[in-house]
Image (cartoon, grey):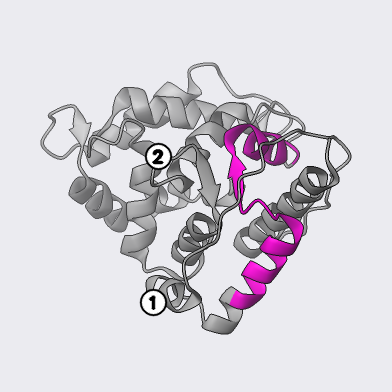
Amino acid sequence: MTGCAKRCKQGLVKFASTLHKLVTGTLIKDKADDDLEMTIVCHRPEGLDQLQAQTNFSKRELQVLYRGFKNECPSGVVNEETFKQIYSQFFPHGDASTYAHYLFNAFDTGNTGSIKFEDFVTALSILLRGSVTEKLQWTFNLYDINRDGYINKEEMTDIVRAIYDMMGKYTYPVLKTDAPKQHVDAFFQKMDKNRDGVVTLDEFILSCQEDENIMRSLQLFENVI
């Protein structure tokens, strides 16, 4: 493994740890011992002025974020396998691979197969400093796996089951096998206003804003970013 690739892996671990700490308030210890080969793809991000206009970060904040990202990861991008390896270190008692796949796709808005610095800071801006509506729109896109503009029961079940798998048996020692289905059925009972079998963005946002329990339940994914 090249020194550049290894340094990029270590830097991404630090970046993910910082992201996790910012969202949850928890300091995560780096574990960058395992080597992971990755393709080095040179990528130069958009101008900071443009990113500043597109996010809720100041130019100074973007400079600091980019300097650290560039110094530790010269390639400027991270692929899905690297992302899964990094993410799994935060959840040693469970299987985070499936949820990491869905989360990777939510970050990879351009469907390019890689996450760039712009993708990270755009999502981070929404999750940390976005409005309630913006955060719910991002969450909706996470659940809308096939990106058709609707959430069906199968998609929500897949996401919820992936979260349960990731958290592991130590977090949910008495979790029943049908818990994800019950969780999803309860969501759809409240969200699917017109009973057409799918949840639209408007239904999703309205239901979440009306019900504090749903809002708390939907925060589960933020705790594992």
User: On the image, numbered disc 2 is attached to which residue?
Assistant: 111
One can see residue 220 in this view: no
Residue type pointed to by label 2: Asn
User: On the image, numbered disc 1 is attached to which residue?
Assistant: 53
Q: Label 2: state its secondary structure.
A: loop
The answer to whether residue 106 is left or right of residue 27 is left
Q: Give the range drawn in magenta.
A: 63-89
Q: Which residue is drawn at 32% across and 53% down?
A: 137
Quadrant that contains the N terminus? top right
Q: Label 1: state its secondary structure.
A: helix
Residue 155 painted magenta:
no
170 is higher (above) or lower (below) than 18: above
Residue type pointed to by label 1: Ala
For the view shown, which residue lies furthest in the right direction? 33
Q: Residue at x 48, y 61 (%)?
A: 127
Q: Quadrant of residue 199?
A: top left
Category of crowding for the residue at label 2, using alpha-carbon neighbours closer than 10 angstroms: few (below 14), some (14–19), many (at least 20) = few
Residue 109 % position (x, y):
39, 47
